[in-house]
Image: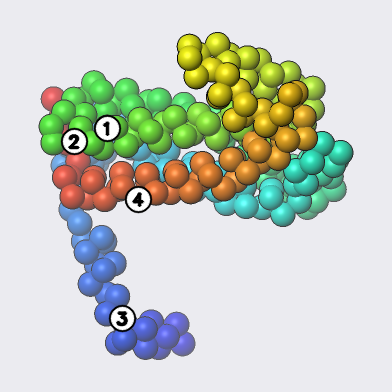
Amino acid sequence: MLKGVYNWIDERLDITPMWRDVADHEVPEHVNPAHHFSAFVYCFGGLTFFITVIQILSGMFLTMYFVPDIINAYKSVDYLQHKVAFGGIVRGMHHWGASLVIVMMFLHTLRVFFTGSYKAPREMNWVVGMLIFFIMLGLGFTGYLLPWDNKAYFATKVGIQIAESVPYIGTYIKELMQGGEIVGAETLTRFFAIHVFFLPGALLALLAAHFFMIRKQGISGPL
């Protein structure tokens, strides 16, 4: 039955050449762990993407229960953690995945730097990668406030104060992040919107550009 559905779609959209082009794409020998043990360092980018996918999927699950207001935010997280089936596991995956994705991205960035993969003709992809890095940091920061407990509240206050210390534009950054005179309801709503809509949208666009350039330019060779 599935084959019949596939053939029906393929006759109309000719999708076979699309996925065959991806599936048949040869992996360079220097990034194949079967040939070189050092090739494992080239897996950091793929592992980062894998964890990112887990973060997106687990985040979608969490948003079905999270209530982004100061009265119910903590209660909704507590309900998810202790009452929803597998809620604690999924939240744990999202919580620890947020730290792990930063670690893996840092290792990926180190690999790119020390193998000279940022050099011509891949300078634009390096810039896109750095933008992805900053977006990941932003996702981690904005997500930290959402449980609305004491640790999240005061950590966010410190983070906003650090942002405020930036010369010339610090005040504007604080107003953008805080949304009001204090870290309160407006801040939580703003952080939720940034965490769930704005930053993921930018992340997906940059990831598409990142993968397009990798496919177009190929994986850089070893030093």
Q: Is residue 161 left or right of residue 54?
A: right
Rounded to the nearest whole Å, what is the CA distance between mark 3 and mark 1?
34 Å
Comes first in the chain, label 2 or label 4: 2
Rounded to the nearest whole Å, what is the CA distance between mark 1 and mark 2?
6 Å
Residue sitting at x 13%, y 32%: 120
* Circle 4 Cα neighbour tier, 10 Å, few/some/many (<14 / 14–19 / ≥20): few
**Which numbered disc covers residue 126?**
1
Residue sitting at x 79%, y 41%: 69
Mark 3 near mark 2, Cβ–Cβ under 8 Å? no
Q: Work out whether residue 82 can be spotted.
A: no
Instruction: Check disc 3 and report the residue beneath it.
Output: 13
**Which numbered disc covers residue 122?**
2
Mark 4 near mark 3, Cβ–Cβ under 8 Å? no
Comes first in the chain, label 4 or label 3: 3
Rounded to the nearest whole Å, what is the CA distance between mark 2 and mark 4?
15 Å
Q: Amino acid at mark 3?
A: Leu
Q: Amino acid at mark 2?
A: Arg
Horizontal and vertical percent for residue 25? Answer: 20, 56
* Circle 3 Cα neighbour tier, 10 Å, few/some/many (<14 / 14–19 / ≥20): few
Which is nearer the eye, 177 or 109? 177
Dot 3: what SS?
Answer: helix
Please give the count of numbered marks on the rendered protein: 4
Quadrant location of the C terminus in the rendered image: top left
Instruction: Check disc 4 and report the residue beneath it.
Output: 208
Horizontal and vertical percent for residue 112? Answer: 26, 28
